[in-house]
Image: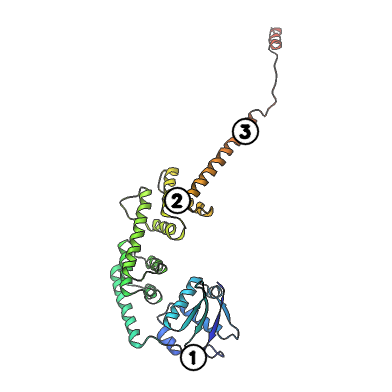
Amino acid sequence: MGSFVLKNRFSNTSVMIENDFIDKYMARANGEYVKVYLLLLRYLNHSTTSLSISEMADSLDITEKDVVRALKYWEREGLLSLNYDSNKVICGLEVGSATLGEPPLIHDIQTFKSRKEDLKQLVFVAEQYLGKTLSKTDIDKINFFLDSLGFSVDLIDYLIEYCVEHNHKSMDYIQKVALSWSEQKITTIAEAKASVETYNQDFYKIMNAFGLRGRTPATSEIEYMNRWLKQYPFSLDLIIEACNRTINSIHQPSFGYADKILKDWLSKNVQNSDDIVALDVKHKDNASKRKTVKQRVSKNKMHNFEERSYDAAELERKLYDNF
C-alpha cells in the first residue's frame, strides 16, 4: 500500500487527546485500535506528514489488516474520515471534525449505556453456553465482536451457540469464526447460517472422501479444511482429488499428507484438473526416463570388468599332463 497524507484540524504544536476520548471511547475500544489512534495523533505533529499502512503496522508490531480495521473502527466512531482511491485503497484521512478541532461525539450517554447493557447481556449468555465465568480477556473478545466487528447482539449470540454446538468452547476459536464471518461481510443470522451450511456440506464431502463418516471433525482437521477452503485457491473438486490420492498412496486418511499434495500443486500453480493431468504426464515421463537411465547404468556395471577368453583344448591338455 502507498503512503497517505494526514490532514490535521487540531493544533499541531502538541499531541491533543480530548477528555471525551478517554471517557467515552478509549475504555471500550480494542487496545490495538487505541494504539493506532494515538500514533496518528503523534504523526500529525510533523509539518509534512506522509504515512503508510505498512509503516504504522511495523511501528506498532501489528498486521496491516489490524491497522485498516482500526482506521475503519475510528471512522465508524466519527473520530476520523477516510479517503479511498479508485482501487478502494486508503489514500488519505482526516482526524477531527470540521468544527474547530473537536472530534464529533456521535454517541450520547444513552447510547453508551445501551452498549454496556448489550455487553453485559452477551457476557451472561456466553457464560451459560460455555459453562464458566468469563475472564477479562474473554469479555474483551466479546466487546471486540460488538464494537470493532459491528456484530449485533443476536449475531454474537448465534456465533457462540454455533461454536458450542460443534464442541468448540475456546474463545480463541470463536474469535477465528467471527473474523471469518467479518471477512465474508456477514451481518445477519440468516447470512451466517447460509455460510455455515455451505462449509458443513464441504466438510462432509472431504470427510467422506477420506472414508471418515459418522463423527464430527476434530479441531486439527477443521483447521486443515478451513485452510484448504478459504486460503488455498482450489475448488472443492481439486481438494477431493488430493484426498483420493492420499488414500491411493498410503491407504489411510491423512490430512497432513493431503495438505502436502495441495501445497505442491500450489507451488506449481495448479488451477484446474487439466493442470493436474499435465503434471501427471510430466511425472510419468520423468519416471520413465529415470528407469531407462537406471537400466543402462545397471547393464554397464555388469560389463564393467575385464573379459577373459579360454582355450578349452589347452585346459584339457594341462589337466591330463598333471596326472
Image quadrant where one finds the C terminus? top right
Circle 2 is placed at which residue position?
258
Q: Residue 200 at what x, y percent from top left?
A: 34, 58
**Lower position in the chain sequence, tag 1 or tag 3:** 1
The residue lying at 48 percent from left, 48 percent from top is 274
Q: Secondary structure at mark 1?
A: loop
Image quadrant where one finds the N terminus? bottom right
Question: Are the residues at dot 2 and dot 1 in contact (C-beta closer than 8 Å)?
Answer: no
Circle 3 is placed at which residue position?
296
Q: Secondary structure at mark 2?
A: helix
Which amino acid does the dot numbered 3 rest on? Answer: Arg
The residue lying at 41 percent from left, 54 percent from top is 236
Crowding at dot 3, Cα within 10 Å, few <14 / some 14-19 / many 20+, comes out as few
Circle 1 is placed at which residue position?
101
* Most distant residue in the bottom direction: 100
**Lower position in the chain sequence, tag 2 or tag 1:** 1
Q: Secondary structure at mark 3?
A: helix
Which amino acid does the dot numbered 1 rest on? Answer: Gly
Crowding at dot 1, Cα within 10 Å, few <14 / some 14-19 / many 20+, comes out as some
> Is residue 32 visible to the viewer in this orientation of the structure?
no
Q: Residue 19 at what x, y percent from top left?
A: 44, 89
Residue 59 in which image quadrant: bottom right
Tell me how far mark 1 sits from mark 3, CA to CA: 84 Å
Q: Residue 116 at what x, y percent from top left?
A: 33, 81
